[in-house]
Image (tube, rainbow, N blue to C red):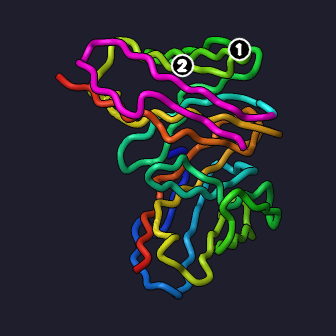
Amino acid sequence: DAGITQSPRHKVTETGTPVTLRCHQTENHRYMYWYRQDPGHGLRLIHYSYGVKDTDKGEVSDGYSVSRSKTEDFLLTLESATSSQTSVYFCATGGGREETQYFGPGTRLLVL
Amino acid sequence: KNQVEQSPQSLIILEGKNCTLQCNYTVSPFSNLRWYKQDTGRGPVSLTIMTFSENTKSNGRYTATLDADTKQSSLHITASQLSDSASYICVVATGGGNKLTFGTGTQLKVEL
């Protein structure tokens, strides 16, 4: 998984609860991404970061926020989890443009 | 709207046989096209990346082709192995190359 870890790997939570997912990389890649993967959909970009404290929205960013205080860490926060946010979340890193994106192992989130 | 469509949705082949997976896209502006392999329960792993000027790229038993005029790509797998059983995802990058549009994947099963 190219030096990418995600924590937790599995989480069950209740509607309305805040949830934070963590992505940690050891390759010093500039770009980091959060995606969600749902049946019948391709992976969809939630947010991405192009440097420390530099982030931007993806196509499905509503209900999510991110922070990147260090090169190696990228946090995804669900301020108030909803059942529609039940999904598998993948973190990815890369150098941008024509470079490969490397994906983490994923976090399975179930919101009851 | 940027879209990536893959066919077939699923495919079963016998070990040792060849197969070809298809990808059609309507993404603008085009930056590059990628094929990823995703094993069950794991993150996607990059197989190939092709820019506009490349029409063939190989990675071991995997060969990807790109026809930028017709906006089609294919992934050919030679002499399939049981370990090739996975979802194969076509991805098109747009803009600066960091915004990716993912197909929903072709689920390949290789049987004895």
Residue A22 image position (x, y, % from top left): 57, 68
For badge 1, the amino acid type reads: Glu
Indicate the position of residue A72 as horizontal and vertical percent values.
67, 60
* Figure check: B81 above or below A76: above
The C terminus of chain A, quarter of image: bottom left
Rendered residue at 29%/12% (across/down): B17
- Please report whichever mark, 1 or 2, sits nearer to the chain's N-terminal start: 1
SS category of the residue bearing label 2:
strand
Q: Type of residue at label 2? A: Ser
Q: Is residue B17 left or right of residue A46?
A: left
For the record, the magenta segment spans B1-28
Residue B54's label in the rendered image is: 1
Please report the residue visible at 75 percent of the width from the left and 58 percent of the height from the top: A49
Crowding at label 2, few (<14), some or many (≥20) Cα neighbours within 10 Å? many
The residue that mark 2 highlights is B74
Closest to the observer, B55 or B60 = B55
The chief SS type of the magenta part is strand
Query: What whole-number distance in Å separates the C-alpha atoms at marks 1 and 2?
Result: 13 Å
- Nearest the viewer among B72 and A104 is B72
- Whether residue B74 is in magenta: the answer is no
Q: Quadrant of residue A64?
A: bottom right
